[in-house]
Amino acid sequence: MKKIMLSLVLILLIAGIGAPIFNGMMIERVVKNAVDNINTRYADTGSDIRLRIVQYDRNFLSSKIQWEIYPGALGRVYGIEKVILIERAKHGILGTTSTTSLEKNRWFSTFVKNELEGKNPLDIQTRYDVLGNIKSSLTLDGFSIKKEDELVDILPAHFFIQSDKEVKNLIFKGNWEGIIAPGKIKLAGVSLDSTQDKITSYIWQGKTSISADHISLDDGQNLFEIAGFTSDTTVAYDKKTDSISLEMAPGITRIKFQGDTGRDLFVRLCINKIDARGYEEIVKIYSRAVNDTIKSIESQQPAEDMTDYIMERMEKQISKTAPQLITACEKLLRKGLEIKIADLRAQLPQGKIKGDISLSLSQDMTMIQFIPIAMQPSAALELFSLKSDICIPHGLTGDNPNLLSPVYPGMQTGLFLKKGDNLIHSAETREGKLFVNGQEVLFN
């Protein structure tokens, strides 16, 4: 019995001594593979952002890693050539924990010294487990900075990100108490929750939820306020049909602008059965346009409002890719493609708005097939299926003849019918015919 106990003690002792060494070796491999995977992803999408491990000192119980992040053209626009990260890791029996610092960045240390009285508000902790999963948390303490002789309060925040060793499955969560610039902006109670799984370099499926308790903007003349903002975005990939479904569902509990108040605003926007290859090509074209835009302005003198300047250049770059985008979009025109506006609702001072609209393709088509539709609208009935139901308050539009009178010779009613205090609309296609408000539209 004593021999068995002694053997167990020796095994545990050896494991306790050997585990940190093994974990140190394993984590080094995980970190270097992660860097390679991230760099490959950026390269595949046409970005010149790069990560680099400058120094990796692995000892028995600890490691010191110096990272460098090169933001490429975007960094050069804002005068940041690279970001240096110093990571100090401790090897444990079941994994490795580390602390990361920005101490080697002069721009950061100068900001902390001059603006924050030497108090670093940022804390970054990372955990590497025995399976190679990476879990990092970033905590930001609240602080105030002076801008244009006014104090701006940056409130505390906490973010968490988790990745597998191949950087194919990501989880991101965050909470930020917000930012306050008295008399100008207030953002409070922001949260983010996202889970993403890699399908290709350009296709990631998952769900992202964003919310904010309060948003207000004041330009001195108009006050814009939002309470209870939420937005869910879902991307789902179907391997059997090689298609993608997109859904966005924004909602607002209350919105106020220029004295008018709206409540309980919500809508669900869906695009279903998108051809995955066409979708990937569109994302690829757009991503490369963004990267080319940033690269094209890196040598330019920064404008006063860099955001507006970048957007202007972006529009020009997108216009250059218009022929490619049209070709890519044509790949999406496949049977079953559906665009939906569902669960639309809002409570306005004039009354309630409700609506549901669905438009889908009944067969594959090409861009050229839109031409005969323009000349003969009835041709659309062979290509599209439509169903819509809408209710809006009469006080919002009044007796608008464009809504209440026929807008096409074959219509027997207007787009809407007045019913009590509301305007009601319904439309659907059945057996190659179009019905609006229960009456068939007659085409010549």
Image (spheres, rainbow, N blue to C red):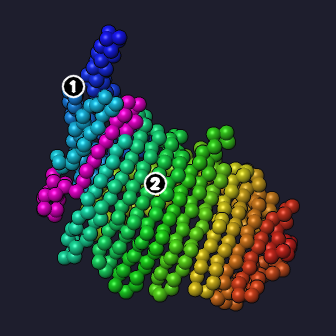
Q: Which mark is residue 278?
A: none
Q: Amino acid at mark 2?
A: Asp
The CA distance from mark 2 to mark 1 is: 37 Å
Nearer to the camera, 345 or 149:
345
Nearer to the camera, 151 or 367:
151
Q: Amino acid at mark 1?
A: Phe
Q: Which mark is residue 60?
A: 1
Q: Which residue is mark 2?
A: 193
In the image, residue 53 lies at what x, y percent? 26, 35
In the image, residue 175 lies at what x, y percent? 38, 58
Toward which corner of the image does residue 313 lie, by quadrant? bottom left
Position of 431 with respect to 339 (left or right) is right
Q: Residue at x 85, y 75 (%)?
A: 439
Quarter placement of the C terminus = bottom right
**Disc 1 element:** loop
Does residue 338 belong to the magenta stretch? no
Against 262, residue 248 (above or below) is above
Quarter placement of the N terminus = top left
Against 144, residue 382 (above or below) is above
Nearer to the camera, 68 or 21:
21
Report crowding for label 1: few under 14, some 14 to 19, many 20 or more residues within 10 A (C-alpha): some
Q: Tag 1 or tag 2, which sits nearer the N-term?
A: 1
Q: Which residues are magenta?
A: 106-134
**Disc 2 element:** strand
Position of 320 with respect to 235 (left or right) is left
